[in-house]
Image (tube, rainbow, N blue to C red):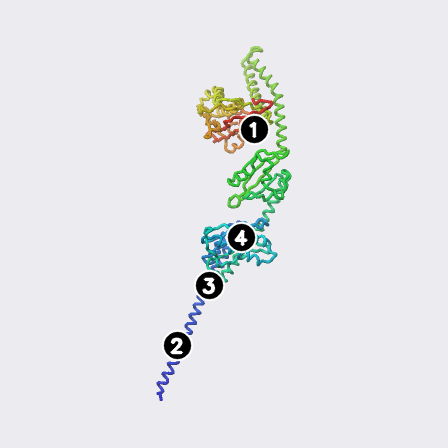
Amino acid sequence: MMPLNQQIDSNTFEELKKDKEILEKQRLAILNILEDTQEGQKELKERYRDLNIIKTLIYELSSSLDIAKIIEKVIRAMRQILPEETNYFYCITPIDSASSQFCACFIYAQIEIGDAYFNPIKKSIKSCLEQLSGSILQREAIINQMRETIKFEVLGGYYSKQAFLKPFSLESVPIIIGNELLGIINISSIKPNYFTQVHRDIFTTIVGVMAETLSRLKILSKTEHSRTKMLVESLSDGVIMFDINKKVLLTNSAVQKMTGLPRDGFYLSEFQKLFPEQEIEKKISKTLQTGEKIYSEEIKIVNFIYELFVLPIYDPEKKIIGGAIILHDITRIKEIDKMKTEFISIASHQLRTPLSAVNWYTEMLLTGDAGELNEQQKEFLNQIYKGNQRMVALVNALLNVSRLEMGTFVINPEPTNIIDLARSVINELRPQIIQKKLEFIEQYNEKIPKINIDPKLIRIVFQNLLSNAVKYTPENGTITLKILLSNDNNQVLISVSDTGYGIPKNQQYKMFTKFFRADNVQEKDTDGTGLGLYITKSIIEHSDGKIWFESEENKGTTFYVSLPLIGMKKKEGTKRIE
């Protein structure tokens, strides 16, 4: 029989062993609890981070009005939350119309992708759309488009037809508000089983946030579109608005009345046919590419005359997104202008006879044909003679203007040495040049051949440009006349530069208008009709040439004229420009 003390020791050992096992289990349980707690805390921190990212996204999207910016912010938020090797595909339907065509359709990828990657995405989206309720708008149209016409813009990675990678994890979620499908978003990865339920929940949440933003933007866009439509409809001018692809978006009833074209199915190509010589489509392309505002002074549709403007339309980022054509009816203005021109022509003709008589009798008196005069009488007659000469010059200018505007003037071209023509005008002005001690510089290309021009008309051009330069250049100034050939030898280039008073910048746009005389010139010289440059411009344009200028106040002015080397076209008429 074992002693009692040995039995106790054996029992104690067994108990201690059991206690140790219990303690070990408790330790492991506590470690598991701690590990679960740590995992829970980590997951809680991640969810807290995700909620903060979504909160920030909601705040940022609340002030976004641009689809591209919205998508950019959504992509950034998803990339912060979803696993690293996730690729994103977006299809967004138009915000401002009921079209089933997508206005944004692209994939953000971090790998090389091609059709092998796209095709499973299309199937996933098609499957997602087919599960939607039949009342969802545009479902069938979008499914058809997915099958046939959908194209992707690849961001991040790059596209290659040879790319063989395929997605093995795919999730598609539609963007829906009420009964309207605004688009669809797909996430994918080349790894299988890549997305957890948590990822799916977050993905769905962000899509919901995006849906609310797009819905708000759609409401704002519809409201703005309605306002624009009402405003455009109320205008008496014809308005045609088009997008960057030259698709007509909006017309008003005034355009229909002016053109006779239907508002439904209005195409720019049909509009162009009304006046093909204007090359409207080229002007539209130029405006969309450069942002240049284009103005056509006079176009005729049936019996009406219009001004035509082509203007660019910008988004808030100053990016050109389309354009507008404005038609302004100037028929009545032209009729009044014609009546005014006819009146001026008749009045000027009637004035010429008495003015000629005054001129003739004054000359007789001054030369002593009617007897001797004292000095005071001669002074009085000289003032009458000078005043009469100014009136004769004004009447002649008005007659020239009326002939140009009525188209009754004659163009009679003949082979002319344009340099000799210019020199003859300079010789006429030589006394004034010497009197004011002006330096006159001449630069000619003597190889310029004789040009078939009307010498009387081009003489008027030289007289106006050179006499203005002499008149408005202070003593000891410089005038430079150049007559050269263009680089392509197709144009004669004439320039008249002076170091005179210059034209104030805020008045330069009036330079070639009737009766314009700059304020700084009127202060120094009260003479002048303000018709010389208007007549000059009209003659140049009837010669198929161009005239323009550069000027800086108190530094001088340079006028440029280009005339085609082939010369002027003959024109029949009843009157000559004098």
Q: Secondary structure at mark 3?
A: helix
Q: Secondary structure at mark 2?
A: helix
Q: Nearer the viewer, residue 388 or 330?
A: 330
For marks 2 and 1, the one nearer the N-term is 2
Q: Residue furthest bottom?
A: 1
Marks 2 and 1, how far apart in space?
114 Å
Marks 3 and 4, how far apart in space?
32 Å
Residue positioned 61% across, 25% down in the render: 344
Q: Secondary structure at mark 1?
A: loop
Marks 2 and 3, how far apart in space?
34 Å
Question: Is mark 3 in CB contact (under 8 Å) with mark 1?
Answer: no
Residue tagged 3: 43
Res. 514 mark: 1
Mark 3 neighbour class, 10 Å CA radius: few under 14, some 14 to 19, many 20 or more: few
Residue tagged 4: 91
For marks 2 and 4, the one nearer the N-term is 2
Q: Label 4 amino acid?
A: Cys
Question: Is mark 2 in CB contact (under 8 Å) with mark 1?
Answer: no
Mark 4 neighbour class, 10 Å CA radius: few under 14, some 14 to 19, many 20 or more: many
Looking at the image, is mark 3 or mark 4 nearer the viewer? 4
Q: Label 3 amino acid?
A: Glu
Q: Position of residue 289 (x, y in %)?
A: 51, 41
Res. 20 mark: 2
